[in-house]
Image: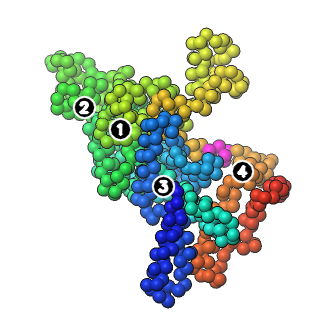
Amino acid sequence: MKNLAQSNYRSALQTVRDLKGKYGKTWNAINPESAARMVAQNQFRTGLDIAKYTAGIMRKDMAEYDADSSAYTQSLGCWHGFVAQQKMIAVKKHHKTTSKRYLYLSGWMVAALRSEFGPLPDQSMHEKTAVSGLIEEIYDFLRQADAIELNDLFRRLENGEDVQDQIDNFETHVVPIIADIDAGFGNEEATYLLAKKMIQAGACAIQIENQVSDAKQCGHQDGKVTVPHEDFIAKLNAVRYAFLELGVDEGIIVARTDSEGAGLTQKLPVSQEPGDLASQYLAFVDAEEVAIEDAKEDDVLLKRDGKLVRPIRLANGLYKFKDGSNIDRVVLDCVTSLQNGADLLWIETPTPNVKQIANMVNRVREVVPSAKLVYNNSPSFNWTLNFRNQAYEEMLALGKDVSQYDKNNLMDAKYDHSDLCKVADEKIRTFQIDGAREAGIFHHLITLPTYHTTALHMNDLTEGYFGEEGMLAYVKGVQRQEIRKSVSCVKHQRMAGSDLGDDHKTFFAGENALKAGGGKNTSNQFEVDSKDNNVEQELSVVV
């Protein structure tokens, strides 16, 4: 976002000056410059302001991708506002812009890490409001990142530094969230109500899947049960109505199909005429031919090609789809969703294989040329093994010698520097580029990265801290790295808003303000003068 900080500042400055003129001496203590600065540091008043702004960003990015597939977008899943905040601060630091970088809110992580019931599997058992609550929390932290960075810039401006251009062209940390509503947590009315809460919290993009709500499973587990298209379309409509009611006209709906790995359905839809959606869905249901005299009492029968057939029904009442029908069902799901209000698709796949994804997407594009995907670069895949297998098969097909490799043990570390593994790693490196170009993937995300990084980092710190390294494990592995890499939260008091609060207290109480940032604040140990080449070395010795 360009120039909003300065335009807000000027507008607020004039507004407060006018108000002071209107209310006279009772407003003497209010400083227009301080009030305008606070307005500039809080660019979004409500979650709806965020949803409208970020929806516009996504629509623009979608159009740019349609024109050039190299303009794909990315995100990482975050389970806490602080994690999201630090991600976007790092994005700005390393890449200089937040453009094409989003956030993902994973229902899996909400269930596993945010439920009052405790850790839960990804089966929609967590509280509905935990989802909208996390969206609101994430945007609170992102707005705080804006306020802190702008506050630092205003401080530097007051101290005579030439940072006006940085203020005028400040880019917000607020970016789109693609938020997981699972299967809607109930019927279409329940979906509508939760969608409203999510949009009001700031979500511009809602991802919904075609599973049965009360039988929902993680997309990478067995036992998934899909719903007829009519049921899913009703939920797509519910989300769209929620966007429209709240004035988020450009809201994005991501329609996810789990049909690739789902072999069951709970309902048999009612067909009104041959070839309609219900008829196409029923055609995928596995059935056995039966004569009427052989039908059992209370059997459910269908007429198919002039014959009576009995749908294959399990003991739990669920119906089985025909083996090998999964890809055709995925394609029909995708086409139907796009023809009924969805903006983007999500196809859950068993492995990350660009050719297999492209095969499905290209079939969809035969009907809807603009079809594009949000794709889960999931930690549920063994990326190393999948791509080493792909590299092995390619080398074999090209007649190359693969005798040195044990096909059943390609994860072995002894292969890490082999030619095969170099090929595999290059395929992993370019997976997002290749997928965007060849398989219509507009948005690449990793659902659970911060779940795994937290576990990994705690494993490494715990090993050393409770072992012989003691405190050195923390200093060497964490704090020294934070200092040398200029990680924002090394000064954790500032990151929590201490400096920002000190300035606010000065605005409110003047010289009477009791501030935290004095000479005895230990955070001063982390002040680094970038002009002093010896400071970093000295700090390294101290810690």
**Dot 4 amino acid type:** Lys
Answer few, some or many: residues within 10 Å of disc 3's Cα (few below 14, many 20 plus, some between 14 and 19).
Answer: many
Q: Is residue 287 above or below residue 530?
A: above
- In the image, which is nearer the foreground, mark 3 or mark 2? 2
Q: Earlier in the sequence, mark 2 or mark 4?
A: 2
Instruction: State the separation of the CA atoms marked 2 and 4.
Output: 56 Å
Q: Amino acid at mark 1?
A: Asn
Give the residue at mark 4. Answer: 485
Earlier residue among tags 3 and 1: 3
Magenta stretch prevailing secondary structure: helix
Which element type, helix, strand or loop, lies under badge 3? helix
Residue, x 39% and y 46% (percent of image)?
252
- Contact? badges 3 and 2 (CB < 8 Å): no
- The part of the chain drawn in magenta is 453-459
Q: What type is the residue that disc 3 sits on?
A: Leu
Of the pair 100 and 270, the residue shown nearer to us: 100
Q: Is residue 214 magenta?
A: no
Could you say which quadrant of the image residue 460 lies in?
Answer: top right
- Nearest to the observer: residue 335 or residue 283: 335
Quadrant of the rendered structure where residue 399 is?
top right
Visible residue check, residue 23:
yes
Q: From the image, tell me which residue sits under label 2.
A: 277
Q: Are marks 3 and 1 in contact (CB under 8 Å)?
A: no
Q: Earlier in the sequence, mark 1 or mark 4?
A: 1
Tag 1 near tag 2, CB within 8 Å: no
Q: Look at mark 1 in the image and give the residue it sits on.
A: 210
Q: Nearer the viewer, residue 362 or 138?
A: 362
Instruction: Look at discs 4 and 3 and give the one toward the viewer.
Output: 4
For label 4, the crowd category at 10 Å Cα-Cα, with few meaning under 14, some 14 to 19 and many 20 or more, is few
Point out the frontmost of discs 2 and 4.
Answer: 4
